[in-house]
Amino acid sequence: MDKEINRLIRKETKRQNEGVELIASENYASKDVRKVCSSILTNKYAEGYPGKRYYGGCEYVDQVELVAIQRACELFGCKYANVQPHSGSQANAAAYRALLPEGGKILSLVLNDGGHLTHGSPVSFSSHTYEFVFYPLDKSGHLDYDGILELAKKEKPNVLLAGYSAFPYAIDFKRLGEIAHEVGAYFMVDMAHIAGLVAAKEHMSPIPYADVVTSTTHKTLRGPRGGLILTNDEELIKRINSAVFPYYQGGPLEHIIAAKAICFKEALSDDFKVYVRQLIANNKACRDEFARLGDKVSDTDNHLFLLNVLDSFNMTGLDAQKKLELINITTNKNMIPGDTLKPNKTSGLRIGFAAVTTRGCNIEDAKHIARLIHNFLSGSISEKEAKQEVKEMVSHWKLIEKI
Ligand code: DSN
């Protein structure tokens, strides 16, 4: 194999094995998922959809894609799925196109409060194609459902959008669906972060209440890097399919679609339910340990929480992220509700347990991680001591090649 790339893959493998991965959107895909990602299915062009392709020789990739669609529908309890989006951003772009005209209005949560770039950030296509109005969080960082209803009545959006990237609380999709439909808007949910929790029935499913649900497949769902769109509406799936191909994308990645099919099957298993319950318990145990130590931390109902490092350790999120990287703990700086610092500095860190739980992190490890971060960021242990503690902890976990 190409020596240069092989050397870099080996280095990245070592980095992943030696590190405590707390980036809330990351995970480790199974051997089967990774194997299928590198399969010969990558050789095939298949623009179009099963039975209606623009190329010959699609009889087997048609079946692969149909299996993926059927399993996605079974896993999430819905009628229709498009498994072709290359990413969550592509899925969101296609969903918007299916739901509203260019220039139409979307009511969403701003990036700084936990939304996503594609939910109306000025640096994303979304804010250039649609008009965004943002609903605020209440003072405690929770959704203010009455406030959202009031704003929806005033703004009359085409779409009410829910589902977030840095939001640690349960989302009442039923209530938000009622609000959207009361003002004549479509209800769209981007469940990328919590898809695994929804699959394992550890979070309310948006499927019965939303007109369209988008997701990625690589976060808590633990599959290959990619996107997904779900709906129960026969008319909407036609518009979604045309928006994905030919409007936004060309040839689908059938090797990734096959890996999505593997991921959906894995997520239907009892083992996956056990994994998600452990993930939620680990995350809560770590959060509670920070609180016990007197640090300023959000509460949590899901797979992530926000640690206010400015108030807890008098440092910015950027500095905390960089400092933790020195001891092989990976996190990302994140705005916290009401943040006074800029997005490139931030007052917070986003911490999540999807990846480390896959490797075998347990409740004791999760509490240990909180003490380790607290002690290192407050300067009561040295870099050498902290690094040694990380080394000992990960030595009990699975190697990522074995997952
Ligand atoms: N960029 C992802 C995250 O880290 O949350 C969302 O797509």
Image (cartoon, rainbow, N blue to C red):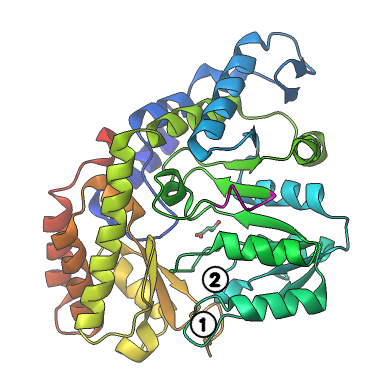
The three-letter amino acid code for the residue at tag 2 is Gly
Report the residue at 64% width, 42% height from top. Answer: 229
Q: Which residue is mark 1?
A: 337
Q: Is residue 120 visible?
A: no
Q: Which residue is mark 2?
A: 114
Mark 2 CB within 8 Å of ligand 1: no
- Residue type, numbered disc 1: Pro
Q: Residue at x 51, y 51 (%)?
A: 205
Q: In this orientation, does residue 194 appear?
A: yes
Q: Position of residue 33 (x, y in %)?
A: 42, 30
In the displayed structure, does residue 77 sit left or right of residue 279?
Answer: right
User: Where, by quadrant of the figure, is residue 41 drawn?
Assistant: top right
Q: Are marks 2 and 1 in contact (CB under 8 Å)?
A: yes
Viewport quadrant of the C terminus = top left
- Disc 2 packing (10 Å; few <14; some 14–19; many ≥20): many
Disc 1 secondary structure class: loop
Give how far across and how far down residue 177 sits, in percent.
65, 60
Which stretch is magenta?
206-211
Left or right: 402 in relation to 342: left
The numbered mark, 2 or 1, whose residue comes first in the sequence reads 2
- Queried whether the magenta region covers residue 247, the answer comes back as no
Mark 1 nearby-residue class (10 Å; few <14, some 14–19, many ≥20): many
Residue 286 location, quadrant: bottom left
Gap between marks 2 and 1 measured at Cα:
8 Å
Q: Is mark 1 within 8 Å of ligand 1?
A: no
